[in-house]
Image (spheres, grey):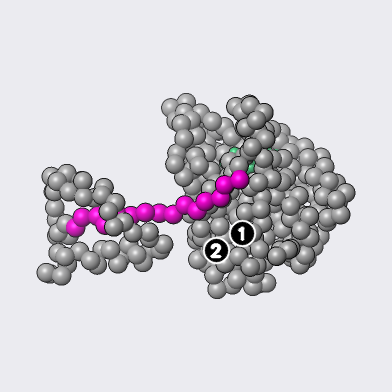
Amino acid sequence: MGLDFSERVAIVTGAGNGLGASHARLFGSLGARVVVNDLGGSGDGTGSDETVAEAMVAEIKASGGDAVANGDSVTDGEKIVQCAMDTFGRVDIVVNNAGILRDKSLHKMTDEDWDLVYQVHLQGAYKVSQAAFQRMREAGYGRFVMTTSAAGIYGNFGQANYSACKLALHGLSQTIAIEGRAKGIQSNTIAPIAASRLMGTVMDEEAMELLKPEVVSPLVAWLCHEDCTSSGDLFEVGAGWISRVRWERSQGSYFDPAGFSVDDVADQWEAINDFTDAEYPTGTSSTFKSIQKNPHLAND
Ligand SMILES: NC(=O)c1ccc[n+]([C@@H]2O[C@H](COP(=O)([O-])OP(=O)(O)OC[C@H]3O[C@@H](n4cnc5c(N)ncnc54)[C@H](O)[C@@H]3O)[C@@H](O)[C@H]2O)c1
């Protein structure tokens, strides 16, 4: 099929290491002009080093690609998007990938741990995406990928700050998908699993090889291609596995909206939690449809 990105400009945040570096390399090899953004700090969000982004750009250029380095923090999203505009004149693709970890169980979490993780993951993705969204609306085309985590989808011990922000990114993505639809803009979310410096301390060599970031990037590139029509969707990906995740809702139980008791809820608890004939809701209107089926409403 030979999908390529020769007309496209792609911003990849946190592209100096791990998954972002792999995404940037793939985009570069498929003809995209790439903005390699990376603050170059440590895994816990301290420090900065502009040579990290520059080294990746040198690598892409040495392989025949075209790229520019950007060392701003994602919290300065406008600067990153301006870099794309100044260098390449457009922005078609944004992969929000930059990330840090400050793991603590909730009772030990400091406000600094919470705020830093929030700033990089959620505030950063918002700032880059909002600045890019304006340009994409004007151009009538755009593709976003947000990077969530299994910790965001399912929760994970010691990651209250991280999991809260990671799931919020999927909320952002779903709304970009809705607001962008009429302007040719799509957004999807991936929950990757990959060996990186954030994982290196907890994995042996065999696992590190199986979980190469390179086997996550083809999904990212496909979601950013003009032929891909998916938007607002969520995928888990890693070690040669790609799968889609969606919401499931039980049929539920109906009560009299005029009022009902705690005992009524307790009596119906099993039925509320019964997933027989479950639905897969895809929009806020489906909530109202379910409410309208309340047999008590028909009697009023
Ligand atoms: N590796 C995994 O298994 C895994 C699992 C789930 C989610 N993720 C997510 O994937 C993304 C990439 O993770 P990774 O494992 O490749 O980590 P990594 O540490 O190898 O790479 C993250 C990059 O983001 C950069 N960065 C950090 N703060 C930044 C900022 N403010 N502005 C710009 N760049 C910044 C870092 O310098 C680093 O190069 C992260 O969002 C992470 O949460 C990773």
Residue at point 11%, 69% (across, down)? 299
Q: Residue at x 59, y 34 (%)?
A: 101
Q: What's the amino acid at mark 1?
A: Leu
From mark 1 to mark 2, how far is it between C-alphas? 7 Å
Q: Main secondary structure of the magenta part?
A: loop
Query: Is 148 on the left or on the right of 260, as rendered?
Result: right
Q: Which mark is residue 223?
A: 1
Residues rendered magenta in the picture: 240-254
The residue positioned 55% from the left and 63% from the top of the image is 230
Residue matched to label 2: 230
- Image quarter of the N terminus: bottom right
* Left or right of 49 in this view: 287: left
In what element is the residue under mark 2? loop
- Relative vertical location of residue 192 with respect to residue 299 in this rendering, above or below: above
Q: Earlier in the sequence, mark 1 or mark 2?
A: 1
Residue situated in front as seen by the camera: 228 or 127: 228
The 10 Å Cα crowd at callout 2, few under 14, some 14 to 19, many 20 or more, is some
The amino acid at mark 2 is: Ser
Binning the other alpha carbons within 10 Å of mark 1 as few (below 14), some (14 to 19) or many (20 upward) gives many
Query: Between 196 and 277, which is closer to the camera in this rendering?
Result: 277
User: CB of mark 1 within 8 Å of CB of mark 2?
Assistant: yes
